Amino acid sequence: MKNRFAFLLVVFVHGCFASDLAFAQEKTTTRKLVICGGGSLPDTVFDKFRELAEGMHPATEPQLVVIPTASQRKVDLKATQELWSARGFRDVQVLHTTDPDIASTDEFVQPLLTASAVWFDGGSQQRIANAYLDSRVDSELRQLLLRGGVIGGTSAGAAIQSRVMIAGGKNEPKISTGLGFLPEAIIDQHFLKRNRLARSLAALRQHPNLIGLGIDEGTALVVEGGATEVIGKSYVLRLEWGDEKLKLDAFGNGATVPLKSQHDSARRNHACS
């Protein structure tokens, strides 16, 4: 059941804020995303991720590509394959570079052409953006979604799925540009655990036509087209400005989180390709 609370904060808003959202041209009915708030995730999250990957080609073994670029740790291919094998994936490849030129080569993107699932590890979301934004990897990830594949990620791997991306900051966010698989929202992670309400509110003040999604540790928001489901131990908080007021709702395990906002029509009118 949905655990929900709401309150209204009256604030004075000065000036007009313009969003730098590049609204997705892809058919959002095909997108499948697993957006995780970090920390220790329950098995049910990975079970759902595998289920969505299997749905692309039910008769074949799902092919997973893990992208660990957010982390500065040395990539351990064997450990990564063993970890994901325990989660039900036997066909696992790792894709990693910090060079955007390499990320646009035919050889580098080859694993994405047949993948049914991609997972972004945690670390720094800006490292992911620096390497892959507007590269061949970026375009092949969108093609994967159009083919019915699934993209998941935790912590930095969640934040990167916004277009307007919180790249860092404690109370005042550093705003950057993410890959935009969920362009209608600004995603923040470790939300309750690290008390990130203030920085999400600050980000939304700069982009009030978007919604905010604060995903706590141990919790995932699963998106299938326009449908959503919360899986995990804690909450997904949804924030939205409207009529100079903030609406905040919390959604627990099994709940549906609305993605549409009162600004959707205006956003589509100002969308760019």
Image (tube, helix red, strand yellow):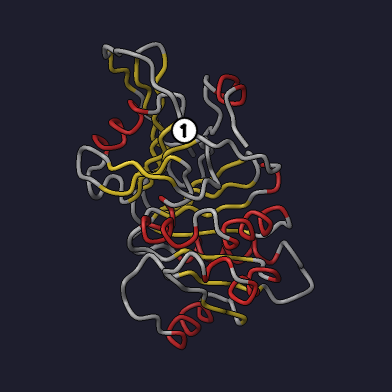
In this rendered view, identify the residue nearer to me: 148 or 193: 148
Q: Quadrant of the C terminus?
A: top right
Could you tell me which residue is drawn at 46 percent across and 24 percent down? 209
Q: Amino acid at mark 1?
A: Asp
Q: Nearer the viewer, residue 96 or 162?
A: 96
Q: Which residue is mark 1?
A: 20
- Which residue of the protein is positioned furthest toward the front in this rendering? 101
Rendering coords of residue 22 (x, y %): 55, 37
- The quarter holding residue 51 reads bottom right
Residue at 57%, 42% (x, y): give it.
228
The image shows residue 182 at horizontal and vertical percentages of: 53, 43
Percent of width and height locating residue 59: 79, 73
- Compared to residue 115, the image places residue 209 above or below, namely above
Residue 64 as seen in the image, left or right of residue 218: right
Left or right relative to 171: residue 67: right
Compare residues 50 and 168 and report the one nearer the observer: 168
Report how many numbered discs are placed on residues in the image: 1
> In which quadrant of the rendered view does residue 7 lie?
top left
User: At x 61% / y 26%, what residue is drawn?
Assistant: 268
Of residue 273 and residue 215, the one placed in the foreground of this image is 273
- Look at 55% across and 47% down and name the residue there: 181
Q: Is residue 168 left or right of residue 54?
A: left
- Crowding around mark 1 (Cα neighbors within 10 Å: few <14, some 14 to 19, many 20+) is few
- Judging from the image, what secondary structure is the residue with disc 1 in? loop
Asked if residue 113 is positioned above or below residue 158 in the image, the reply reads below
